[in-house]
């Protein structure tokens, strides 16, 4: 017998994290949206998770864009 599904504890932990995100960010929470690509709240949650992961990876530094080169018509 193959185990194709994640452990039950992980599912409930993810559900709690998703619920907390929706509650604090003012998104519509629906349990059916967990792991469902294409729903607005789940896609926003995944994007937020990626942003937090990048913020942690960069040591909490703000994301500052590099200054742009000035346009010069003489080139």
Image: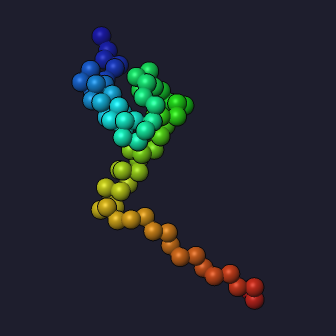
Percent x, y of residue 68? 58, 76
- The quarter in which the N terminus is drawn is top left
Residue at the image point whose x is 29% and y is 62% from the top: 59
Residue at the image point whose x is 52% and y is 34% from the top: 40
Residue at the image point whose x is 31% and y is 61% from the top: 60
Q: Residue furthest top?
A: 1
Regarding residue 20, the answer to whether it shows in the image is: yes
Residue 73 position (above or below residue 29): below
Q: How many marks?
A: 0
On the image, which quarter does residue 62 sit in? bottom left
Percent x, y of residue 63? 43, 64
> In the image, is 13 to the left or to the right of 41?
left
Q: How is the image coloured?
A: rainbow
Q: Residue furthest left?
A: 9
Residue 9 position (above or below residue 22): above
Closer-to-camera residue (39/72): 39
């Amino acid at each position: 017998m193959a185990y194709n599904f994640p452990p039950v504890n992980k599912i409930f932990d993810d559900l709690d994290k998703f619920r907390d995100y929706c509650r604090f960010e003012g998104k519509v929470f629906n349990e059916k949206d967990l792991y469902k690509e294409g729903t607005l709240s789940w896609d926003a949650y995944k994007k937020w998770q990626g942003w937090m992961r990048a913020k942690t990876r960069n040591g909490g530094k703000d994301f500052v864009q590099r200054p742009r080169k000035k346009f010069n018509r003489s080139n």
